[in-house]
Image (spheres, rainbow, N blue to C red):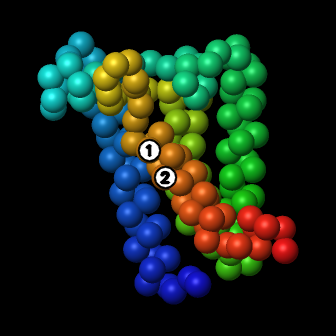
């Protein structure tokens, strides 16, 4: 399941996306905080949006949000270590979710909010970390769909 080369390439690609996300967050907050750059006018662009809630802007209160984020992050670390050690196919999606969660968690710890910089019409703000988490969810669904014993319970 885990070839060393495949694991290394996958891990390197994930880390590059993580670092790119951190760089874009820095640039949008420090250099372009009052700038909107649209790739497709009024549809897709770069702009600063500070998300004080959790997923989809749901607000729980600062302490609860931080505690919930920390708990989820800790569970992802445990799942990542377990899936790597036991050679389970879930390592890849868990690793992606861990990277995405780590970047957003770093924002939450340092600023109290998550820095979003991508805008998609009509009113959606997100970042590359969010895309890593979404990719993780899609990979888990694919693994589940491909594994008949998970679907049928047999």
In the rendering, at what x and y percent does residue 139 appear? 54, 60
Q: Residues within 10 Å of mark 2 (few under 14, many from 20)?
A: some
* SS type, badge 1: helix
Nearest to the observer: residue 28 or residue 44: 44
Picture residue at 53% right of the left edge, 54% below the top: 138
Residue at the disc numbered 2: 135
In the rendering, at what x and y percent does residue 107 appear? 51, 31
Picture residue at 16% right of the left edge, 29% below the top: 40
Whether residue 95 appears in this view of the structure is no
Residue at the disc numbered 1: 131
In the rendering, at what x and y percent does residue 124 appear? 40, 24
Residue 52 vs 14, above or below: the answer is above
- Quadrant that contains the C terminus: bottom right
* SS type, badge 2: helix
Residue 67 vs 101, above or below: the answer is above
Give the Cα separation between the discs numbered 2 and 1: 6 Å
Residue contact between numbered discs 2 and 1, judged by CB atoms under 8 Å: yes
The answer to whether residue 117 is left or right of residue 103 is left
Picture quadrant where residue 146 is located: bottom right
Q: Residues within 10 Å of mark 1 (few under 14, many from 20)?
A: some
- Quadrant that contains the N terminus: bottom right
Residue 81 vs 130, above or below: the answer is below
Residue extending farthest right = 154
């Amino acid at each position: 399941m885990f070839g060393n080369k495949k694991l290394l390439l996958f891990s390197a690609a994930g880390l590059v996306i993580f670092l790119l996300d951190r760089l874009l967050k820095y640039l949008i907050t420090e250099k372009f905080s009052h700038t909107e750059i649209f790739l497709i006018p009024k549809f897709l662009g770069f702009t600063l949006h500070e998300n004080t809630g959790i997923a989809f802007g749901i607000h729980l209160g600062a302490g609860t949000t931080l505690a919930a984020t920390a708990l989820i992050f800790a569970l992802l670390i445990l799942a990542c270590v377990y899936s790597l050690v036991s050679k389970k196919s879930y390592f890849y999606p868990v690793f992606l979710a861990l990277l995405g969660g780590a970047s957003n968690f770093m924002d939450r710890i340092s600023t109290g909010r998550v820095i979003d910089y991508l805008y998609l019409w009509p009113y959606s703000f997100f970042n590359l970390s969010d895309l890593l988490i979404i990719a993780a969810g899609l990979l888990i669904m694919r693994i589940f769909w491909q594994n008949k014993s998970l679907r049928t319970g047999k």
